[in-house]
Amino acid sequence: MLSTEKSIITKSYRASVSGILRLIRLGSITIFCTSLPVQALSMDEQRTRYEKAIAAVERNNVATFTQLKSELKGYPLYPYLDYREFMRGLSDAEVAEVEAFVGRYDSLPFKNTVRARYLNVLAARGEWTELLAFQTTLPRGESYQCQYYYAHSQAGDKALAMSGAKSLYLSGSSVDNACNKLFDELKDQGKLNNSLVLERMLLAFDNRNTSLIRYLNKQLTGSAKASGQQIIALYNKPQGVGDFAKKSKVTPFNQRLTRLSFERLARIKSKDAVAQFTRVVEGQHYKALERQEMADYVSSRLMSTDDKVLAKWRDKWLKQTANASLLERRIRVSLVEADWKGVEGWLNVLSEKDAKKLKWRYWRARVELEKGNKTLADQLFANMTGKRNFYSVAAAMHLEQPIDIPYQTTPLNVEALKPFNPALDRVAELLVLDKVVAAKREWQYLLQQADVEQKAMLAAFASESNWYHLSVQATIAGKLWGHLEYRFPVAHRWWFEFFSKERELPLTTLLALSRQESAFYTNAVSPVGARGLMQLMPATAKETSKKLGYRYLGKNTLSDPGINIRLGSGYLRMVLDRFDENRILAFAAYNAGPHRASRWLKKSDGNLDAIAFIEAIPFNETRGYVQNVLMYDIYYSKLLGQPLELLQEGELNRRY
């Protein structure tokens, strides 16, 4: 089944490009094949030779590579062959040669790779003057910055070098080994002293990096050793922070150490932090703003407390805070408790700027509705409608008005894309060769060079070419929020329609969830390892496969659209079955896990309506996820000419 599905996907890519080439022949598009190959080779023959050339250079078969390269001078991906050849000799290249090569390929993304690797070459050679001539500004990346500052040190600019060395040294994490020589210089200049080591120990404390704290402590000398031991003692037992604050001299160092220790205590046992708060802030003479920030830190740990004394302490400080994030969390606490008076009270604490946000205008209207002021509530709801926003649509739902989604489009004008012809050639070829990562890199680099109007045209071109993820990326880069057809392409339609029928799931829902999960990037891998269009964890994919009776061949197959949609739609169907077809709960479960969705449902205990339950979800990511997928479902319904609704009857009428 895997090989069959892979074959279909490959044919889909080729069919997409063939369609564009057909438009070229008809004169509709004049983007691709702007220069002809020297040899009279067909595109398929050129692709075959290109892949053979890449294989040859990777096997170090220079003769074969050189021969094949000479036959492909007109092929769109020829610059990549030039790049491979140039990189082979980079260690022996002179600055002028590198500058010339980078200048020749200034519009290609590998330019930055060449420059970065050549910095390593110059550093390895010890050619510091040449390095500074080549790299005239501070580069990105820790190791390159270390080389840059060390080069300045060797060139005689000790002041700049030592300033840079200090900034790199003062990190709460380990620093790249490329910085060792620079730090040795810092030490030789007498600037890597106890004071600097202690300052870095506090950064490591803040970063919860125990190994670095211990490593740095060993470097202290003389009387500074006592300060190092004090840092370690408070890190291990922050319960002693009150005594330390009262007994220690008020200095910037002691204030910083006290605050870090107090925050650590708050993370370990918030109740103890509350008990020691007064001694801590008075002992080190913190100003009002710092006291509030420290109280805010503890309050953030007490949002779900059932202890009335702690809750009272928390609320006393929150009434004085300017921290909008904490106030929003406090409003949600009142929502979970169905405490509408509390919701109103905390809305009143918001700043004027925050109170104007659609989200809080919606909840202000809901408060009035709960108080029986329907006329005022309807007026507030009416002032919110007609926007591409979850709360605007929710307001229309309350008013029983049709959902209005603002919409715009930019027709494709290929003339405007002429400056980008070579790059578009390369993107097309990379996609035909299934080099999706490289195609995405080219596209991102292309978007960086385009203005807003060009980004809109590139989005239109990608949409017409069925480059689904690239179309989405262009709308994000250009902030083209009203261009729904480009932001929300009907991607991989055959697969989604097939499994929509197979799983009895709305096509719009499958598209909406996949758009949220991956923006239709087939090779997407999340930080925790979720993969593909519907972002499946390998363990979930394996378990779902067993339940579906499908042979699962490992995580690498999850980049295949057919396999990913098969398993993702199967898992979504199971989650919907578990939660009685309720999309709110199913989307929350898909993002955060079914056990969390069940726990949140138990906590709200039937006190909430659908919108209030969504608002009360404690995870920012999951709350936004549920709202987004519901809205994306509406967008896809609009694009596909289907009725628009935010919630289904069962979702709307249920108590949560």
Image (cartoon, rainbow, N blue to C red):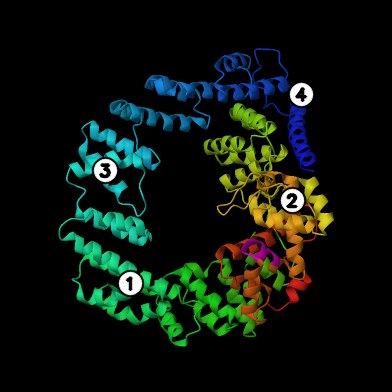
Residue located at (73% from left, 73% from top) = 652
The answer to whether residue 509 is left or right of residue 365 is right
Q: Amino acid at mark 4?
A: Arg
Q: Is residue 349 magenta?
A: no
Write down the region rendered in magenta.
Answer: 586-593
**Real-space CA distance between mark 4 and mark 3, rounded to the nearest whole angstrom:** 62 Å
In which image quadrant can residue 381 be found? bottom right
Element assignment for label 2: helix
Location of the N terminus (image quadrant): top right
Residue that mark 4 sits on = 25
**Real-space CA distance between mark 2 and mark 4, rounded to the nearest whole angstrom:** 35 Å
**Real-space CA distance between mark 1 and mark 4, rounded to the nearest whole angstrom:** 75 Å
Question: Where 655 falls versus 442 (above or below)?
Answer: below
Question: Where 225 falls versus 529 (above or below)?
Answer: below
Q: Kindly report which numbered mark, 2 or 4, lies closer to the viewer in this rendering.
A: 2
Residue that mark 3 sits on = 183
**Real-space CA distance between mark 2 and mark 3, rounded to the nearest whole angstrom:** 52 Å
Location of the C terminus (image quadrant): bottom right
Q: Specify few, some or many for label 3: CA neighbours under 10 Å numbering under 14, 14-19, or 20 or more.
A: many
Element assignment for label 4: helix
Sequence order check, earlier mark of 1 and 3:
3
Residue that mark 1 sits on = 237
Residue that mark 2 sits on = 565
